[in-house]
Amino acid sequence: MEFMGGRRLFKQLPQSRAEIHGALVKGLPYAVLVHIVDHLSALSADQIADALGISGRTLRRQKEQPDKPMPADLASKTWLFAETLAQASAVFGGRDAAERWMARPAMGLDGARPIDLLRTLQGAELVTEFLGRLEHGVYN
């Protein structure tokens, strides 16, 4: 939740998967996405926007409407992006290292950059599974 602004942006933090689902269907405020973009250093706003399937221009426009709710599909992709970044941060020992890893081709992902795989649920699952293997010392 810290990657998404935590208590500052959520009136009540979701405590279960069902509550997370409800929050995503309702639509997270664009302030969550703006917070993510503003607090990352190794990934550009355009890279993040591309991973979420929106244009950089759309992202910049939404910065002016931070309280507006995102569509459910974008809220879901944003949540998944933040969860993946949190998992990578745990595996690599910090957010900066995780961001750098996400932006580089990974041999265990057939040379794809993890951030590019986040565009689809199947690609995101590949990244999550690979991070799980890295966490347990299995590199292929």
Image (tube, rainbow, N blue to C red):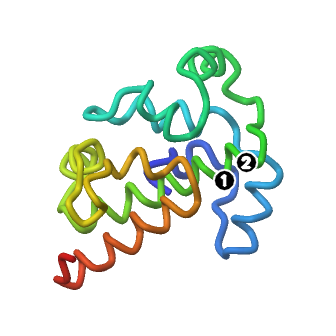
At 18% from the left and 62% from the top, the residue drawn is: 93
Q: The C terminus is located in which quarter?
A: bottom left
Residue 76 - label: 1
Rendered location of residue 26, percent (x, y)? 83, 50
Q: Is residue 115 left or right of residue 51?
A: left
130 vs 9, left or right, is left
Secondary structure at badge 1 equals helix
What residue is at 50 percent from the left and 33 percent from the top? Answer: 50
Q: Position of residue 135 (x, y in %)?
A: 24, 78
Could you give the CA–CA distance between mark 1 and mark 2, rounded to whole angstroms? 5 Å
Q: Which mark is residue 73?
A: 2
The amino acid sitting under disc 1 is Ser
User: Residue 123 in the image: x percent, y percent?
Assistant: 49, 59
Position of 30 relative to 129 (above/below): above
- Contact, mark 1 vs mark 2 (Cβ under 8 Å): yes
**Vertical arrangement, residue 83 with respect to residue 130, above or below:** above
> What residue is rendered at 53% in x and 20% in y?
56
Q: Residues within 10 Å of mark 2 (few under 14, many from 20)?
A: some
Quarter occupied by residue 86: bottom left
Q: For the view shown, which residue lies furthest in the front direction?
A: 110
Instruction: Specify the amino acid type for callout 2.
Output: Asp
Badge 2 element: helix
- Residue 15 vertical placement versus 137 (above, below): above
The spot of residue 63 in percent (x, y) is 60, 20
Foreground residue among 9 and 25: 25
- Residue found 58% across the figure and 60% down from its top: 121
